[in-house]
Image (cartoon, rainbow, N blue to C red):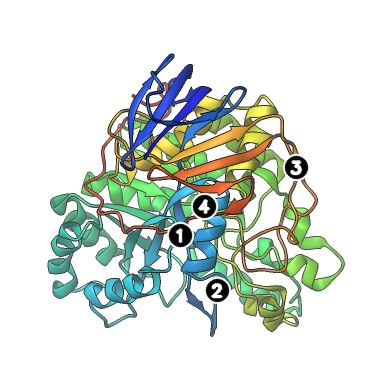
């Protein structure tokens, strides 16, 4: 079946073009003005923006954290993603310490296979380092796992920095790239012990025990290891001005550094932790924590300048009931926020419609850069002949309101309850098939995407990407 998306405006990272888009056999087969209709089914896209399907490079579905499992598994999480225009997620496969990477990968494949509504891939978590794991890195690349994750905090996940250095060298040799969670673990533990000793156990202590300088210190620390190893790295969920300064400094030294941020760091302020009702504040516990207005401004500015490369969600959802485990002690609140469903509409509303970034910028950080960074460009991330028929048809005039009552995310709240949107997603196509129509998910069937090596692009301080 052929589908002709007629009369819309095609968005790329370079700009916007009036063009029709022909979808055929799961792919984009032609893009251009006044394409012949032939036997195609015509969809009127006048007044609509056509984005490539959004890619969310940071989700946690079906993940056990502190004795509980995320509210969203691959079925609900990926349906919510698809409804929000995200046609591909890259989730984090994590072996337990002592396990092989292969065992971790196999477990995550079983979680996703036959359940994922949108396309998916996995980053592989390196939470242990030895000769066996070093040997497995090549096998991961062969299996389409080209990106890896390391932690500088969380005792269950972090590895000693000598191991981290060796892992970076091995990834360089094999052609993989690492994303790293940067926070200074030791001092966070010290500050947490202080808060506990003083009886300060409410969520208000959460941002105070994980302050911005400890994130920036870890970013700088990692970037010096990466400098020594001479490898590109990704700073995941960068939240604050100080951390951004560390990224800028490394880029000035000539290093290749990619930076990701998330909607909640762009849109929320740390006053959420001072809400008088304990659970209302507890809902916002995530790491790194929500920062200040000045940090939001710095992140938007960096997005606009091309210094931040991707916006992902770090979707890691727990219901209010699950978060209640920590109702007398903020350190026991499972950390993470829901968000996979609303990233596109939030970025359009508060970025594009608000005049902070252009639609092309939005395409760059949600589509093109994640596709390049995570080794699936130009199959994903662009509307061009031969690319997958993953299309988001955005209606800039169909304003809406975000509510938990309406969402497919399997949680009883959203951080954006009652927020008005500028426009909304009219339709989503997944590999050429109509998957979402005005908020209704019609067809699903996500596939594992075998990803190649990261397609290096120059980012940053000296004038955006090429
Ligand atoms: Mn995460």
Sequence-wise, the earlier of marks 3 and 1 is 1
In depth, the one of 26 and 378 nearer the eye is 26
Residue under numbered circle 1: 117
Q: Is residue 308 visible?
A: no
**Does dot 4 land on a helix, a strand or a loop?**
helix
Tell me if residue 168 comes above or below residue 240 in the rendering: below
In the image, farthest residue toward the right: 276
The picture places residue 170, in percent across and down from the top left corner, at: 17, 57
The picture places residue 352, in percent across and down from the top left corner, at: 63, 29
Marks 3 & 1, CB-CB < 8 Å contact: no
Tell me if residue 460 comes above or below residue 71 in the rendering: above
In depth, the one of 47 and 52 nearer the eye is 47
Residue density around tag 1, few if under 14, some if 14–19, many if 20 or more, within 10 Å: many
Q: CA distance from mark 3 to mark 1?
A: 24 Å
Residue under numbered circle 4: 82
Q: CA distance from mark 4 to mark 1?
A: 7 Å
In depth, the one of 128 and 337 nearer the eye is 337
Tell me if residue 99 comes above or below residue 462 in the rendering: below
Residue under numbered circle 2: 70
Sequence-wise, the earlier of marks 4 and 1 is 4
Based on the displayed image, in which of its 4 quarters is residue 121 positioned?
A: bottom left
Direction from residue 325 to residue 68 in the image, left or right: left
**Does dot 3 land on a helix, a strand or a loop?**
strand
Residue density around tag 2, few if under 14, some if 14–19, many if 20 or more, within 10 Å: many
Mark in front: 2 vs 3:
3
Q: CA distance from mark 4 to mark 2?
A: 18 Å
Residue under numbered circle 3: 400
Mark in front: 4 vs 2:
4
Sequence-wise, the earlier of marks 2 and 3 is 2
Mark in front: 1 vs 2:
1
Direction from residue 47 to residue 12 in the image, left or right: left
Q: CA distance from mark 2 to mark 3?
A: 27 Å
């Amino acid at each position: 079946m052929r589908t002709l998306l007629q009369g819309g405006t095609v968005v790329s990272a370079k700009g916007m073009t009036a063009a029709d888009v022909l979808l055929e056999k799961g792919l984009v087969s032609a893009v251009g003005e006044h394409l012949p209709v032939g036997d195609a089914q015509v969809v009127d896209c006048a007044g609509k923006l056509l984005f490539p399907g959004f890619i969310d490079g940071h989700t946690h579905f079906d993940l056990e954290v502190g004795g509980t499992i995320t509210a969203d598994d691959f079925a609900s999480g990926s349906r919510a993603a698809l409804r929000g225009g995200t046609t591909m997620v890259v989730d984090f496969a994590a072996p337990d310490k002592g396990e092989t990477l292969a065992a971790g990968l196999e477990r995550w494949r079983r979680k996703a296979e036959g359940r994922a509504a949108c396309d998916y891939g996995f980053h592989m978590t390196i939470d242990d380092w030895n000769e066996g794991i070093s040997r497995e890195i090549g096998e991961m690349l062969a299996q389409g796992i080209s990106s890896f994750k390391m932690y500088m905090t969380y005792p269950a996940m972090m590895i000693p920095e000598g191991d981290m250095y060796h892992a970076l060298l091995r990834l360089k040799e094999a052609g993989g790239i690492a994303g790293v969670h940067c926070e200074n673990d030791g001092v966070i533990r010290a500050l947490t012990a202080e808060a506990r000793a003083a009886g300060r156990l409410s969520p208000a202590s959460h941002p105070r025990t994980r302050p911005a300088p400890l994130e920036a210190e870890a970013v700088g620390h990692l970037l010096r290891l990466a400098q020594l190893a001479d490898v590109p790295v990704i700073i995941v969920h960068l939240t604050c001005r100080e951390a951004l300064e560390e990224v800028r400094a490394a880029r000035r030294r000539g290093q290749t550094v990619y930076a990701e941020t998330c909607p909640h760091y762009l849109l929320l302020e740390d006053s959420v932790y001072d809400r008088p009702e304990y659970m209302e504040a507890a809902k916002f516990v995530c790491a790194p924590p929500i920062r200040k207005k000045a940090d939001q401004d710095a992140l938007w500015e960096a997005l606009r300048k091309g210094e931040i490369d991707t916006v992902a969600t770090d979707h890691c959802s727990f219901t209010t009931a699950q978060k209640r485990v920590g109702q007398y002690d903020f350190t026991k609140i499972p950390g993470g926020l829901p968000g996979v469903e609303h990233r596109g509409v939030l970025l359009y509303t508060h970025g594009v419609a608000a005049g902070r970034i252009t639609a092309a910028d939005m395409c760059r950080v949600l589509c093109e850069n994640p596709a390049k960074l995570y080794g699936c460009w130009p199959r994903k991330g662009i509307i061009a002949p031969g690319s997958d028929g993953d299309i988001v048809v955005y209606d800039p005039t169909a304003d809406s309101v975000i509510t938990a009552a309406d969402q497919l995310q399997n949680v009883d709240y959203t951080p954006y309850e009652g927020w008005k949107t500028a426009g909304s997603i009219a339709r989503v196509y997944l590999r050429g098939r109509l998957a979402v129509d005005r908020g209704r998910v019609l067809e699903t069937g996500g596939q594992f995407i075998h990803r190649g090596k990261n397609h290096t692009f120059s980012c940053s301080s000296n004038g955006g990407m090429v």
